[in-house]
Image (cartoon, rainbow, N blue to C red):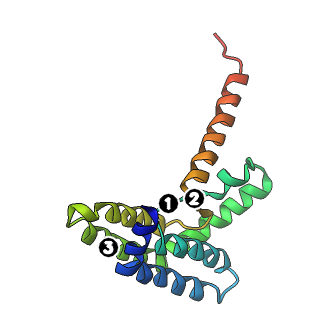
Amino acid sequence: MRFFGNVIWFVFGGWYLALLWLVGATVAGFTVIGLPISRAALEMAKMSAFPFGKDVVHVRELDGKGLNAVTALTGTVGFIVNVIWACSFGFALFIAHLFAGILSCVFIITIPFGLQSFKLAGLSFWPVGRRVVSVELARAAREHKAKIKLGKMHRVPVSS
């Protein structure tokens, strides 16, 4: 079903939404500060073209790195770059995905397409630091992170 959903999505507008992300990636790639935006926009273009069977996770869920000086610095830079993105192409892409989602929810049979559009609309504002992966890999990464957090909670002695 994922294959047919992706084909239908691509034919009826996914190519257009992916093209918008690619335009944003190209424009952002012209500047040094825009390179992280360009990488994120390319990831989101993949998701916009073929969203079924894919999910978006934060890079820290995949690499397993905790908070240290390097991750704090990259997190701060990523935040600043995301704000710049949200004020430029992010808003336009949000509107495009929102419009596509509303159009898709007109008919009951196209509601899954609308839900994908709304998911992409939310990601349009904050793409830096996100990676497009399969649904199964995203689930495994989140379960692994939850196990680590649970392990840390059990190691902390509870005072009475």
The 10 Å Cα crowd at callout 2, few under 14, some 14 to 19, many 20 or more, is some
The N terminus sits in image quarter: bottom left
Q: Which residue is mark 3?
A: 100
CB of mark 3 within 8 Å of CB of mark 1? no
Asked if 17 appears above or below 152 in the picture, the reply is below
Q: Position of residue 51 (x, y in %)?
A: 47, 66
The 10 Å Cα crowd at callout 1, few under 14, some 14 to 19, many 20 or more, is some
Give the mark toward the camera: 2 or 3.
2
Mark 2 lies on a secondary structure that is strand
Q: Earlier in the sequence, mark 2 or mark 3?
A: 3
Amino acid residing under circle 2: Ser
Q: Position of residue 152 (x, y in %)?
A: 70, 30
Separation of disc 2 and disc 3 at Cα?
Answer: 23 Å
Q: Residue at x 62, y 46 (%)?
A: 140
User: 2 or 144: which is nearer to us?
Assistant: 2
Separation of disc 1 and disc 2 at Cα?
Answer: 6 Å
Q: Residue at x 53, y 76 (%)?
A: 45
Amino acid residing under circle 1: Gly
Q: Position of residue 104 (x, y in %)?
A: 27, 69
Asked if 52 appears above or below 61 in the picture, the reply is below
Q: Which mark is residue 109?
A: none
Q: Which mark is residue 53?
A: 1
User: 126 or 160: which is nearer to us?
Assistant: 126
The 10 Å Cα crowd at callout 3, few under 14, some 14 to 19, many 20 or more, is many
Q: Position of residue 110 (x, y in %)?
A: 28, 65
Q: Earlier in the sequence, mark 3 or mark 1?
A: 1
Separation of disc 3 and disc 1 at Cα?
Answer: 19 Å
Mark 3 lies on a secondary structure that is helix
